[in-house]
């Protein structure tokens, strides 16, 4: 296998390895506050991971948005990460 393909397989494996913590570690902070007479009062502050946000959206009845985030943040990267090494390993070397 050419060096270029080995490098691509290695980088794909690294991207999958970094994707997993990126999905489960806290990432998104949502806050709501208001200011009255120069004093800011915080009403709501919540930090969630991508998967936590999907779960929260699903439980609140926003299934379509939860499905879109799940599909484009989880399914597509994992499918891409799974197929790319297979394609590179099966590819015939150039002559």
Image (cartoon, grey):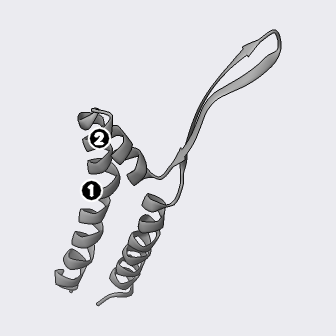
Residue 47 versus residue 6 in the image, above or below? above
| SS for dot 2 | helix
| Residue for point 37% across, 73% down | 12
Q: Position of residue 51 (x, y in %)?
A: 38, 53
Q: Toward the viewer: 42 or 26? A: 42
Q: Toward the viewer: 49 or 76? A: 49
Q: Position of residue 15 (x, y in %)?
A: 42, 69
User: Quarter holding the C terminus?
Assistant: bottom left
| Image quadrant assignment for residue 20 | bottom left
| Image quadrant assignment for residue 17 | bottom left
| Residue for point 27% across, 77% down | 85
Q: Toward the viewer: 34 or 66? A: 34
| Residue for point 34% across, 38% down | 57
Left or right of residue 34: residue 87: left
Tell me, for residue 94, which label it has, or none. none
Left or right of residue 13: residue 35: right
Residue 12 versus residue 29 in the image, above or below? below
> Could you classify mark 1 by the number of other residues whose Cα lies within 10 Å: few (under 14), some (14-19), or many (20 or more)?
few
Which residue is label 2 attached to?
Answer: 58
| SS for dot 1 | helix
In primary-sequence order, the first of circles 1 and 2 is 2
């Amino acid at each position: 296998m050419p060096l270029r393909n080995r490098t691509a397989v290695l980088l794909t494996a690294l991207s999958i390895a970094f994707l997993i913590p990126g999905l489960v570690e806290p990432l998104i902070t949502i806050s709501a506050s208001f200011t009255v007479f120069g004093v800011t009062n915080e009403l709501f502050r919540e930090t969630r991971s991508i998967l936590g946000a999907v779960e929260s959206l699903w439980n609140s009845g926003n299934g379509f948005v939860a499905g879109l985030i799940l599909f484009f943040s989880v399914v597509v990267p994992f499918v891409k990460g799974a197929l790319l090494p297979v394609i590179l390993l099966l590819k015939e070397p150039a002559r």
